[in-house]
Image (tube, coloured by chain):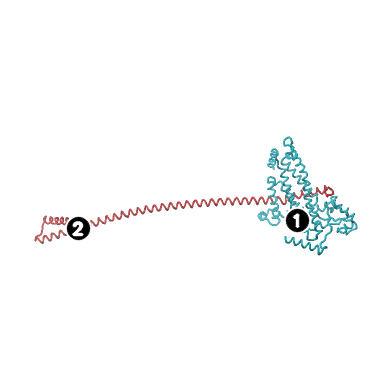
Chain colours: A cyan, B red
Amino acid sequence: MFAVLAVLVIGIVLRFIAPEFGKVGKPEVSFSAESIFSIGGFTVTNSLLLTVIVTIFLIVFSAVATRRLRSGDEEALTTPRGTQNFMELIIEQLYTLMESVNAKYVARFFTLVATIFLIVVVSSWSGLIPGVGSIGLCVAGGDHGAVAEAQTETAAAEPHEVESTTSCAHRTDGYTVFHPLLRAPTADLNMTIALALISFFFTEFWGFKTLGFGYLKKFFINPLKHGMIQTFVGLIELISEVVRLISFSFRLFGNIFAGEVVLLVMAYLFPTLLSLPFYGLELFVGFIQAFVFAILTMVFTSMATESHDHAAEAHAEHGVAAH
Amino acid sequence: MDKLGVNLPLLLSQLVNFALLAFVLNVLLYQPILKALRTRTERIRESLENAEKVKQQLARVDADYDAKLGEARREAQAILGQATERARVQEQELLTTARANIERMEMEARAKVEQDRQQSLRGLQTQLAGLVTQTASTVIGKELQGKGHDDLINQSIEQLGRLN
């Protein structure tokens, strides 16, 4: 606590006694991920690049963590150490938590939910590594999204202001945009929508697999048998299934993207040290968002496999027995 | 969606990336660790069961030991009681025998004393009769002969016997 206060005080003091120290350019905000290069017509964006790096990191880290276990080392089984211990802690905690939500299908859901948690948390935290978002290329024109286009329009109206605040603008005669080499994958809607689609697909898949066509009975309820209110509730359920795609993807994207913007703005307004507390905040937000995404997926898949209908329950029991 | 940077190839690449990652992590991370956790849990459960069995065996051994100890104590008490009873009986027998012996010896001693006394008395009577006869012979100046002599002796003995 004292360290954080000390950092804040030093940052504020530096702001006044040495205003140029650690000064950064005016932050450029882009909703979309910027393209870095193309391979055979396929554009590789900075977020996709970091996604691949994160994926490789997770695979290598996992391979290192479990190499003694996979080699059948008896000592690794009895006395876990280092990375193995760390990963065992995470996996065991996740498994226990999921077991408390749905003990019946935990083995079936675990791979999906744990992978969502790991990739989201590592992706979100990867955006906090120094250099990510701050090291990049100055590209003429650029393929910015809506905000960048708005900035371009502003730049056309006030060219002087833009030139004085963007580091890229000083280098060339025309307007250039800064393309970071790396961008947090979860700050890209492609990633968050992909995760939401996967979560949605497996929720529906396991719902059908467990309950058969009885799964649809919670959406389409006979008004003559159960009343109009139940029918209306069923329709709302159906809508919420689809709306969940949007809430899942935009909640994660919004939180991580907003966190990056906050860091950029704080670094611009109070250079150097004042953004440090917000790094702590973003670490927390990254973890919470990964946790929320994973647990919601677990809860929705669990709900999809539950039924109030006896025939569907019998199907579910049969499915479990077969499984 | 284009303005938000969403396009199909990138979306598909993210989906493929996730599927690949999930598959690899399942093989490299989840399965080995979950297997290890299950094995460890199983071992701990077995160890606890074994500990419980050992505890129960120990309790049984303790109970057996206590039972045997109690039985041994009871047997020892019984043996002690029997030995005490036997000693008491033997004591009584010995006392009875000793008393009988003492009585017998006393009776024998008394009989012997009586016998000795009678014998002494008879010897004394004989001697005394001789003395009387001798004295009488001396007094009357002639020696008693034959039947008169024997009669006098017997008469003296009878008188002595009456006096005694």
The quarter in which the C terminus of chain A is drawn is top right
Mark 1 secondary-structure assignment: helix
- Give me the chain letter of mark 2: B
Q: Is residue A236 among the parts visible in the rendering?
A: yes
- Give me the chain letter of mark 1: A
Percent position (x, y) of residue A38?
85, 52
Amino acid at pointer 2: Leu
Amino acid at pointer 1: Leu
User: In this image, A50 relative to A170: left or right?
Assistant: left
Q: Are marks 2 and 1 on the same chain?
A: no
Q: Residues within 10 Å of mark 1 (few under 14, many from 20)?
A: few
Residue beneath disc 2: B121
Q: Is residue A27 above or below residue B8?
A: below
Near-viewer residue (A173 or A38) = A173
Mark 2 secondary-structure assignment: helix
Name the residue: 77% across, 42% down.
A239
Q: Residues within 10 Å of mark 2 (few under 14, many from 20)?
A: some
Q: Quadrant of residue A200?
A: top right
Q: Which disc number belongs to residue A281? A: 1
